[in-house]
Each structure stands twice: as C-alpha cells, then as structure tokens.
Image: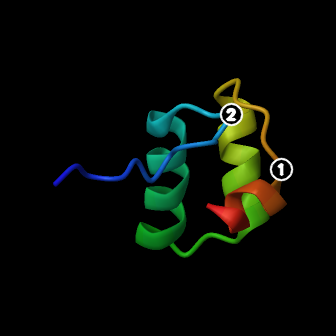
Amino acid sequence: MSKSNPFKGSQSSPEIIRLAVMMYVRFPLSLRNVEDLLHERGVDVSHETIRFW
C-alpha cells in the first residue's frame, strides 16, 4: 500500500510547511507572528496560508 503525500498540490516546499507548523504548535505564536518570522527568513507566505496548513 502506498502512502499518500500530505503536501500534494502545495506550491511550497515540505520543509517550509513543516517549519511553519512546528513554530505555531511548539511556541505561543499567532499565525501573523509565524508569518513575520518566515518573512524575516525570506519566505513570503500569508497567515491565511499558514492557517490552511
């Protein structure tokens, strides 16, 4: 049985998605805080995209 890819259809790399989700879950950050932290690292995504992830 093959595993399904949870990142299928995403325009972002799996590493970026994992980082954003890890920051949101691990630390007491809002979605906008995660958006700002990623922006400082050169990743341009909206807080709505992070919410979707």
Sequence-first disc among 1 and 2: 2
Pick out the residue farthest to the top.
Answer: 42
Q: Which mark is residue 31?
A: none
Query: Which residue shows up at 78% across the image and 42% down it?
Result: 45
Front residue (pair 46, 40): 46
Query: Which residue shows up at 54% across the image and 75% down it?
Result: 28
Front residue (pair 8, 11): 8
Q: Name the mark nearer the viewer: 1 or 2.
A: 2
Q: In this picture, is 37 found above or below 48? A: above
Which residue, given by chain and number where applicable, does mark 2 sit on? 11
Q: In this picture, is 41 found above or below 30? A: above
Q: In this picture, is 19 found above or below 40? A: below
- Under mark 1, the amino acid is Ser
Query: Which residue shows up at 46% across the image and 71% down it?
Result: 25
Which residue, given by chain and number where applicable, does mark 1 sit on? 46
Query: Residue 7 at x, y = what percent?
Result: 50, 46
Please, what secondary structure does the residue beneath circle 1 have?
Answer: loop
Horizontally, residue 27 falls left or right of residue 39, namely left
Check whether the beta carbons of the residues at disc 1 and disc 2 lie within 8 A of each other: no
State the quadrant of the C terminus. Answer: bottom right
Real-space CA distance between mark 1 and mark 2, rounded to the nearest whole angstrom: 13 Å
Please, what secondary structure does the residue beneath circle 2 have?
Answer: loop
Query: Residue 5 at x, y = what percent?
Result: 40, 47
Front residue (pair 43, 51): 51
Badge 1: residue crowd in 10 Å (few <14, some 14–19, many ≥20)? some
Query: Residue 12 at x, y = what percent?
Result: 63, 34
Query: Residue 50 at x, y = what percent?
Result: 69, 58
Horizontally, residue 15 falls left or right of residue 17, namely left
Q: Count the marks: how many?
A: 2
- Under mark 2, the amino acid is Gln
For residue 32, which quarter of the picture?
bottom right
